[in-house]
């Protein structure tokens, strides 16, 4: 669930404002290998294998809401730790709530139309617009795994890249609005193991690498319970401890709050 870390980024930036740092190719990117067309699968084949790996289209479509709870650690702020809750509801509503010990509560949400962020220290609520709003809208798509071709009109298989002891197919995904992104699917398991993007925010553009691990089956669908997000000057680690699906969530949960 890449959206779990994506929707937390703007919250963390409000606590850990840093100067923008240019992103340079990593060692993994430098090792990108392009196979002959005869040996490479198609984009459709990689995506279909991914859907199959996490449980299949039918199992995914049986889920209509999700509540995830866990802990986070922000290594760049002397190991700042706290709790996180993420509420998601089909077709496109979501909100993430972070509790910062000694700092307050932050939140980031999308109600199906409007995207917003609540700062933990000031209590000020910011509306999102432009590319930042477009990104929030994409990330709020509950069935994003099934709609990647709709969310990203141009998908290109770039090659195979070494990630640790494994290899992954690398798909470049270009959305209708925003910068190109990259999805990495494990060659053996078919699971999504990494996602690279450039996120828009009040501090400007920020490159983000996300890594997914510890996949567990919940109601027939595999979800990553361990997520790691790396961006310039910041490393965020999320460990989920509970995921409940098909639970009732009132739409008021996603409503933009008033300034505190």
Image: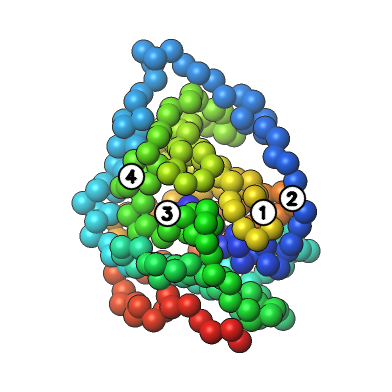
Task: Examine the image and state in which quarter residue 112 appears.
Answer: bottom left
Q: Work out whether mark 3 precedes mark 1 in sequence or the reverse, and give the earlier one.
A: 3
Q: Work out whether mark 2 precedes mark 3 in sequence or the reverse, and give the earlier one.
A: 2
For label 3, the residue is 138
Q: Work out whether mark 2 precedes mark 4 in sequence or the reverse, and give the earlier one.
A: 2
For label 4, the residue is 150
Q: Nearer the viewer, mark 1 or mark 4?
A: 1
Q: In the displayed structure, does residue 176 sit left or right of residue 132? A: left
Give the Cα separation between the discs numbered 3 and 4. Answer: 10 Å
Q: How is the image coloured?
A: rainbow
For label 1, the residue is 204
Q: Nearer the viewer, residue 94 or 115?
A: 115
Q: Residue at x 35, y 59 (%)?
A: 142
Give the Cα separation between the discs numbered 2 and 3. Answer: 24 Å
Q: Nearer the viewer, residue 252 or 244?
A: 252
Q: Work out whether mark 3 precedes mark 4 in sequence or the reverse, and give the earlier one.
A: 3
Q: Where residue 254 sits: x, y (%)? A: 42, 75
Dot 3: what SS? helix
User: Could you tell me which quadrant the C terminus lies in?
Assistant: bottom right
- Which mark is on residue 26? none
Q: In the displayed structure, does residue 102 sit left or right of residue 106? A: right
Q: Residue at x 36, y 13 (%)?
A: 38
Give the Cα separation between the discs numbered 3 and 1. Answer: 19 Å
Give the Cα separation between the discs numbered 1 and 2. Answer: 7 Å
Q: Where residue 120 sits: x, y (%)? A: 65, 77
Relative to 82, does residue 19 appear above or below in the rendering? above
For label 2, the residue is 20
Dot 1: what SS? strand
Q: Work out whether mark 1 precedes mark 4 in sequence or the reverse, and give the earlier one.
A: 4
Q: Is disc 4 surrounded by few (<14), some (14 to 19) or many (20+) residues within 10 Å?
A: few
């Amino acid at each position: 669930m890449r959206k779990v870390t994506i929707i937390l980024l703007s919250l963390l930036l409000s606590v850990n404002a840093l100067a923008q740092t240019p992103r340079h190719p990593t060692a993994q990117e430098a090792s990108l290998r392009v196979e002959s067309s005869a040996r490479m699968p198609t984009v459709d084949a990689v995506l279909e294998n991914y859907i199959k790996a996490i449980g299949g289209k039918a199992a995914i479509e049986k889920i209509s809401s999700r509540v995830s709870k866990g802990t986070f650690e922000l290594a760049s702020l002397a190991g700042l730790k706290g709790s996180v809750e993420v509420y998601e509801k089909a077709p496109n509503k979501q909100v993430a709530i972070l509790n910062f010990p000694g700092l307050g509560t932050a939140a980031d949400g999308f109600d199906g139309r409007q995207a917003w962020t609540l700062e933990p220290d000031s209590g000020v609520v910011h509306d999102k617009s432009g590319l930042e709003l477009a990104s929030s809208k994409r990330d709020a798509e509950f069935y994003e795994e099934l709609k990647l071709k709709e969310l990203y009109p141009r998908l290109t298989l770039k090659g195979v890249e070494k990630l640790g002891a494994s290899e992954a197919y690398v798909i470049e995904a270009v959305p209708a609005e925003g910068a190109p992104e990259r999805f990495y699917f494990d060659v053996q398991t078919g699971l999504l193991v990494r996602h690279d993007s450039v996120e828009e925010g009040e501090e400007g553009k920020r490159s983000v690498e996300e890594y997914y691990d510890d996949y567990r089956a919940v109601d027939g669908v595999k979800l990553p319970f361990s997520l790691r997000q790396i961006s310039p000057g910041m490393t965020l680690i999320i460990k989920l401890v509970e995921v409940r699906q098909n639970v009732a969530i009132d739409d008021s949960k996603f409503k933009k709050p008033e300034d505190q």
